[in-house]
Amino acid sequence: MDYFKHYSTASDSRLISIVLSDGTKPGHYVYFLTEKDFTIGDFVKVGVTSLLRQRLSMMQTGNPRILGFAKILELESGAKARKLEATFKRDFKHQKELNEWFRINEDILGVLNEMV
């Protein structure tokens, strides 16, 4: 699963923490959203947003389980963020459940663990 490393070079992106000042700093983010304490068999949503806190709030509404970002990548442009999102969706289409939600398997867990 080295293709994520290709997209996370110093010139393209950097891994960031969810603690972004007040969480409303605009940017170009690819996020991996899942339930707290996720494991194999659970679901992860991959998406693109410019405002993380708003996206998390929107996704949490109507969901009885506590959601959080498993990983976040900040990229230098919206185009690069959308390209990375499309790469993930293409490579893991066999795990797709509904819309942008994917069932976590060993491969996806490995990718998420790679992005430290």
Image: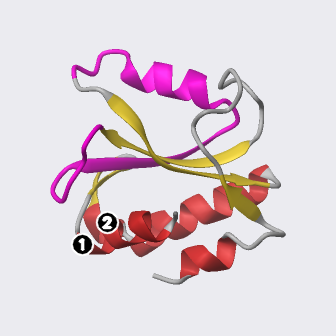
Q: How is the image coloured?
A: secondary structure
Left or right for 92, reference 73: left
Q: Taking 105 as reference, is 18 above or below it?
A: above
**Front residue of this view, candidates 9 and 100:** 9
For disc 2, the marked residue is: 109
> In the image, is residue 28 part of the stretch drawn in magenta?
no
- Residue 113 image point, x, y percent: 40, 66
Give the magenta range: 36-64
How many discs mark residues in the rendered view?
2
Q: Are marks 1 and 2 in contact (CB under 8 Å)?
A: yes
Q: Taking 34 as reference, is 53 above or below it?
A: above
Q: Of helix, strand and loop, which one carries label 2? A: helix
Quarter of the image for residue 5 reads bottom right
Circle on res. 49: none
Q: Measuring 46% from the left and 71% from the top, which residue is drawn there?
A: 114
- Residue 80 image point, x, y percent: 74, 61
Left or right for 60, reference 114: left
Q: Taking 43 as reference, is 109 above or below it?
A: below
Q: Measuring 71% from the left and 59% from the top, which residue is drawn there?
A: 14
Residue kind at label 2, given as amino acid type: Leu
For disc 1, the marked residue is: 106
Q: Measuring 49% from the left and 27% from the top, which residue is drawn there?
A: 56
Density class for disc 1 (Cα within 10 Å; few <14, some 14-19, many ≥20) is: few
Q: Measuring 67% from the left and 30% from the top, which residue is drawn there?
A: 51
**Front residue of this view, candidates 77 and 94:** 77
Density class for disc 2 (Cα within 10 Å; few <14, some 14-19, many ≥20) is: some
Quarter of the image for residue 49 reads top right
Left or right for 96, reference 55: left
Going by the picture, which residue comes out furthest to the top? 61
Q: Quadrant of the N terminus?
A: bottom left
> In the image, is residue 61 part of the stretch drawn in magenta?
yes
Residue kind at label 1, given as amino acid type: Glu
